[in-house]
């Protein structure tokens, strides 16, 4: 098992499906607004760690495993909220180091956001609780011998998350069929 932990950049490309509006007030980013075509509640690409006075605080994390065999990557991931406040919904970004095949069958609540990126809503995350498990398979273009999956929160339902050690990570997956845990 090999897990490469690191910081995944928080900048996302704006696509036709997402319109991001962010205001900066005295150095603090105000929660972004989003218009999402066909996928209500996905949220917008922005900074969950924004310091907004009076905003509730949550501590989101993602745990799971993934494996790859013949260019097919299988992911099973469960979001967790360490609290202290619950979150009605959040958006997690899954960014692969290799491009995805053109055709994908993504689960409900997930949308493609570029050649290598998928955004998925988490659903409600109670304080000190777990969300629903996300299970998906994606086909990579070609059959690379390895891929790195970057996982990060791009929208936290308006909550502030000051701990980015557990909601941003990278996992190296070799095309061996072995399971990699994060």
Image (spheres, rainbow, N blue to C red):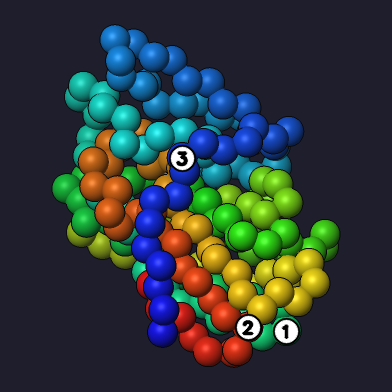
Q: Local crowd at mark 2 within 10 Å, few (<14), some, or many (≥20)?
A: some
- Precedes in sequence: disc 2 or disc 3: 3
User: Of label 1 and label 3, which has the lower sequence position?
Assistant: 3
Farthest residue to the front: give it: 145
- Judge whether 141 appears above or below 159 on screen: below
- Checking the image for residue 91, the label placed there is none
Q: Is 177 on the left or on the right of 26, as rendered? A: right
Relative to 180, 119 lies left or right? right
Count of all numbered marks drawn on residues in the image:
3
- The percent coordinates of residue 31 (x first, y second) are 40, 26
Which residue is label 1 attached to? 70
> What numbered label is drawn on residue 175?
2
Residue found at x 39% / y 51%: 7
- Quadrant containing the N terminus is bottom left
Disc 3: CA contacts within 10 A as few (<14), some (14-19) or many (>=20):
some
Q: CA distance from mark 1 to mark 2?
A: 7 Å
Q: Tell whether 155 sits left or right of 82.
A: right
Dot 3: element: loop
Q: Identify residue for label 3.
A: 10
Q: Tell me where residue 65 appears, x and y as whole percent.
A: 46, 77
Label 1 close to label 2 by CB (< 8 Å): yes
Q: Is residue 160 above or below residue 99?
A: above
* Front-most of residues 113 and 140: 140
Q: Quadrant of residue 156?
A: top left
Callout 2 touching callout 3 (CB < 8 Å):
no
Q: Quadrant of the C terminus?
A: bottom left
Residue at horizontal 57%, vertical 80%? 174
Residue pictured at 41% horizontal, 79% vertical:
2
Q: Is disc 1 placed on a helix, strand or loop?
A: loop
């Amino acid at each position: 098992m090999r897990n490469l932990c690191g910081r995944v950049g928080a900048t996302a490309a704006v696509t036709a499906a997402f319109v991001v509006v962010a205001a900066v007030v005295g150095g603090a980013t105000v929660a972004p607004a989003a218009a999402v075509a066909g996928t209500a509640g996905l949220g917008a690409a922005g900074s969950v760690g924004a310091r907004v006075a009076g905003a509730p605080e949550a501590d989101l994390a993602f745990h799971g495993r993934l494996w790859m065999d013949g260019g097919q990557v299988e992911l099973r991931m469960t979001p967790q909220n360490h609290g202290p406040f619950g979150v009605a919904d959040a958006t997690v970004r899954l960014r692969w180091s290799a491009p995805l095949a053109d055709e994908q069958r993504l689960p409900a609540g997930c949308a493609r956001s570029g050649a290598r990126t998928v955004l998925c809503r988490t659903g409600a995350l109670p304080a000190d609780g777990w969300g629903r498990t996300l299970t998906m398979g994606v086909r990579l273009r070609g059959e690379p011998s390895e891929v790195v999956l970057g996982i990060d929160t791009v929208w936290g339902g308006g909550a502030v998350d000051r701990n980015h050690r557990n909601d941003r990570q990278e996992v190296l997956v070799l095309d061996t069929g072995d399971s990699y845990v994060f």
